[in-house]
Image (cartoon, rainbow, N blue to C red):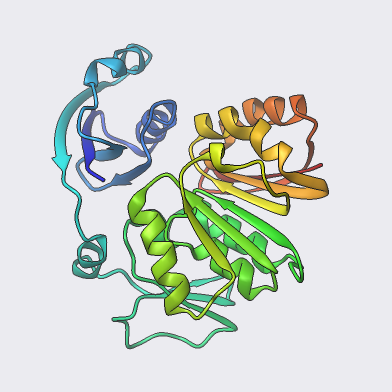
Amino acid sequence: MNYTKVSFKITPDNETNREILVALLAEFPFESFDENNERVEAFAPGDDFDLSILNSVFSEMEFSVETQKEQIPDQNWNEVWEKNYFQPLLIGGRCLIRAPFHTDYPQAEYELVIEPKMAFGTGNHETTTLVAEQILDMDLAGKTVLDMGCGTGILAMLASLRGAKIVVAIDIDSWAFESTVENARLNNIPNVESRLGDASLLGKETFDIIFANIHKNVILNDLPAYENVLNTGGQIHLSGFYTQDMPDIKRKAESVGLTETGFQEKNNWVVYSFSK
């Protein structure tokens, strides 16, 4: 899939203004964000992103923003991340995430070898780490699990290692779909079933546990579909949004019959948990 990278140069540039910008941009169809010393970068699927839709964002800001748009062609994200020295990651002191090209890494209770495709696939993003930490603390023995927005399959595979009986991993991106298939094979995890698509694929089977680490707007739109396939007494863990988005998520979740059970936060990102 091709991507559009939109770069934002902020004046004055400080951490607070960057957080405000990213929070507002989260309302738009960006799949991931990155930052460097000079700019905030946002990535949207496709090659026809219209910058004019951001005018409402800029009108709310008390600082100035310059934008620059760049087309990112479909490419081998493994090579990109290898060139950028993606490092082994230890989550919760128990789960090691590394790539096949790594040679120096610590031993851990669980080890997942991945061919990294994009940032969300390496486990480095706060939301991936937060949900992985939830999985490490859960008893998944014999459970049926759904991983929506599976990326490179880290959460799905970890759920399997933690004892899940069946894991269905769904992503709308073809790179993610292919990566999850490849990584499950690489780690000898046969019970992760990767599917290409969105919530429209749901309905034929039910799950004890659901993980949805996606965009806030996707979650709000798809929560009824998630609730429909969640077994009574089941748990759903939602991530991919900020603490300030929690009231909207809670309102929608409760409207479809889910009950809040808690949340974890890291750098203003959240994993928000509910039960049925």
Q: Residue at x 36, y 43 (%)?
A: 32
Query: Would residue 122 be visible to someone looking at this image?
Result: no
View extreme (front): residue: 204
Quadrant of residue 209 within the rendered picture: bottom right
Image position of 164 (left or right of 10): right
- Most foreground residue, 225 or 247: 225
Residue 63 location, x and y as percent? 29, 20
Residue 11 location, x and y as percent? 23, 27
Q: Which residue is drawn at 25% across and 28% down?
A: 12
Query: Would residue 56 be visible to someone looking at this image?
Result: yes
Picture mark count: 0
Whether 18 is drawn above or below 104: the answer is above
Quadrant of residue 101 within the rendered picture: bottom left
View extreme (right): residue: 233
Of the 4 image quadrants, the one containing the C terminus is: top right
Residue 147 location, x and y as percent? 58, 53
